Amino acid sequence: KLGLVWFAHGLVGWWCVQVASSAQYIIEQFRATTGCGKIEGAVKSMYAAGRVRLAMLQDPAGGGAGGGGGGGRGHEGSFVMWQLAPSMWIVEMAVAGQHVAAGSDGRVAWRRTPWVGAHAARGGSRPLRRALQGLDPVTIAAIFSTAEHAGEKLVDGEDCFVLRLDVGPSVLSSWSDGTAEVIRHGLTGFFSQRSGLLVRLEDSQLTRIQSPGAAAMYWETTISSSLADYRAVDGGGGVHVAHSGRSTAHLARFGVGVRAARVVTRMEESWTIDDVAFNVPGLGPDAFIPPEEVRRSRFYDAMAAGK
């Protein structure tokens, strides 16, 4: 029995080493293909600008709900993004006459929309998802360096390695508050076996919301992004970034009192990058100061202090 136990522990240890080494190999291939290894530590800031097209779509799986206005009619707009190492960023988007923005001053993340104004996001600073959509290979490599190799999958005819990250309990707790509990959040990257590039990014989050005296409601958000057109950035030292892509987001609501089993809203975004630059002259921390409404909020000081 002791021999069997030793063998079992040895097998588990061997498997963990193989999984970890496989993930490291995949990331090293990505770093080599994009050329981001040549600029790691040298790039302090980044700028990107491009065009977007957004559409609300009917989802047959949603029980007949949630297509929304337009039935798939799209709205075109533009966006601009700035980033300053290690964790400051801001992105602004204008679509159909509406302006939205989100950012991080390195301590607190925030967002601003015409519907709810500006407010801080619980849980402190976090990476910008748009940067992970092939725009910032240095951040992509850093984020997935701790991922687990979860197998292989065919994606749009391309054989891919799968790397999986799951957010830990302590971070999930920091994202939650009295009425909203983030139950899980996972991020999956699909890296082409042929090119070594990240070709798809998927993330999902399940949140439980319960107001006093009301039944619990669950919201599940799933976003899948396909990345394409990797090209070298002018003046970027040969670094390649994705210049186009498409994202599909599903927002499902379910729980007691919801007439359909799952009420689904589906949104689609396609984007094209027109301009990318590294080490932007004059870009400093002052450009990432949150809006005044965020700085005045009772949550800001506590989150900035890491409480």
Image (cartoon, rainbow, N blue to C red):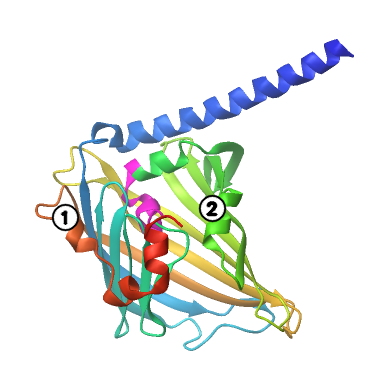
Q: What is the span of residues highlighted in magenta in the rendered image?
A: 126-138
Q: Is 137 inside the magenta-drawn segment?
A: yes
In-image side of 256 versus 247 (left or right): right
Q: Label 2 near label 1: C-beta < 8 Å?
A: no
Q: Earlier in the sequence, mark 1 or mark 2?
A: 2
Q: Position of residue 182 (x, y in %)?
A: 60, 62
What is the secondary structure assignment of the residue under circle 1? loop
- Which residue is disc 1 drawn over? 284
- Which residue is disc 2 drawn over? 171
What is the secondary structure assignment of the residue under circle 2? helix
Residue 196 is tagged as none
Q: Is residue 245 visible?
A: no
Packing grade of label 1 (10 A; few <14, some 14-19, many >=20) is some
Q: Is residue 14 visible?
A: yes
Packing grade of label 2 (10 A; few <14, some 14-19, many >=20) is some
Q: Residue at x 47, y 59 (%)?
A: 123
Secondary structure character of the magenta stretch overall: helix
Q: Residue at x 61, y 37 (%)?
A: 151
Q: Position of residue 215 (x, y in %)?
A: 73, 80
Q: Position of residue 256 (x, y in %)?
A: 76, 80
Does residue 162 lie above or below 54 as drawn?
Answer: above
Q: Quadrant of the N terminus?
A: top right
Does residue 28 lie above or below 292 as drawn?
Answer: above
In-image side of 89 versus 157 (left or right): left
The residue at the far left in this view is 281
Q: Is 219 inside the magenta-drawn segment?
A: no
Q: Residue at x 29, y 55 (%)?
A: 88
Q: Residue at x 21, y 42 (%)?
A: 43
